[in-house]
Image (spheres, rainbow, N blue to C red):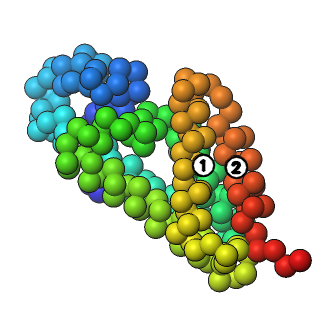
Amino acid sequence: MNIKPRQLEIIEATGKLLTTSGLNGLTIKNLALEMNFSESAIYRHFSSKEEIIITLLKYLNETVNKIFKESSASGDFEKDFTALFRKLTTYFMENPFYVVAVFSEGLMNESARIGERILQLMNNLTKHVRTIIGEGQKKGLITRSLTSEQIVEIIIPAFRHQLFRWKISNFESDVAQSIESLAGSLLLLLKERTD
C-alpha cells in the first residue's frame, strides 16, 4: 500500500481519537483539532472520514500480513506459533490505537465499506492462523480431532479477549505476559496426544 507520511499521521491520529473519544467523537473537526491542522488540510489527503477509516483498516491488514510472513520462517511449529502472537502483541503494544479498529462494533456498522474492510481483516487473520494450525496438524503436533477451522474459532477469540482486557484496563495490564501465557496454554491444549 502506498501511503504517504502525512496520511499515516492522520490515520494514527484517527486511531488515537477513536480510542479516547469513540466513534461519535471521530469527526473531521475533532481530528483537525487533535492534529493542530485545518479541516481543509485533512481533506487534501482524504475525501471523507470513511476514507480515513478504510485506509486505517487497509494499513492494519497489510501490517498483519507482514507480521505473519515474518513469523512463519523457522519451520519450528511451536516457535512460529508463539512468535506470531508475540509479534502481533508487540505491534499492538507499540500502536494501541489500532486495537480499537479490531473491537469497535460501532465502527463495523458505520458503513458497508468499513464493515467489509473489518471482515476482510478478520478473514485474513483467520486464514493465516488456519495455515499455521494446518502445518502443525500435518506434522502430527496438533490434534486432528478438530479441524483447523474449529481450532481457529478458539484461538482468535481467545487472543481478542486478551487484547480487550488490555484495552479496558486502559492499556495498563501486562498484555505481553497474558498473550505469552495464552499461547503456551493453547499449545498445551492442542498438542496431539500419543498416550
- Amino acid under label 1? Ala
Q: Residue at x 54, y 59 (%)?
A: 153
User: Residues at badges 2 and 1 in contact (C-beta under 8 Å)?
Assistant: yes
Residue 112 horizontal/vertical position (percent): 19, 48
**112 lies left or right of 77:** left
- Above or below, 132 against 172 in this view is below
Q: Residue furthest right?
A: 195
Where is residue 74, by image quadrant? bottom right
Residue 195 horizontal/vertical position (percent): 89, 77
- Above or below, 47 against 39 in this view is below
**Is residue 108 shown to the viewer in this render?**
yes
**Is residue 53 shown to the viewer in this render?**
no
Q: Nearer the viewer, residue 2 or 33?
A: 33
Q: Between disc 2 and disc 1, whose residue precedes?
A: 1
Q: What residue would you read off at disc 2?
A: 182
Distance, label 2 to label 1, CA atoms, is 8 Å
The secondary element bearing badge 2 is classed as helix
Q: Residue at x 17, y 30 (%)?
A: 42
Give the crowd class for mark 1: few <14, some 14-19, many >=20 residues within 10 Å: some
- Amino acid under label 2? Leu
- Above or below, 122 against 132 in this view is above
Looking at the image, how many numbered discs can be counted on the residues? Answer: 2
Q: Using the image, tell me which numbered label, if any, was put on residue 158.
A: 1
Q: Nearer the viewer, mark 2 or mark 1?
A: 1
- Above or below, 145 against 50 in this view is below
Q: Residue at x 30, y 42 (%)?
A: 108
The secondary element bearing badge 1 is classed as helix
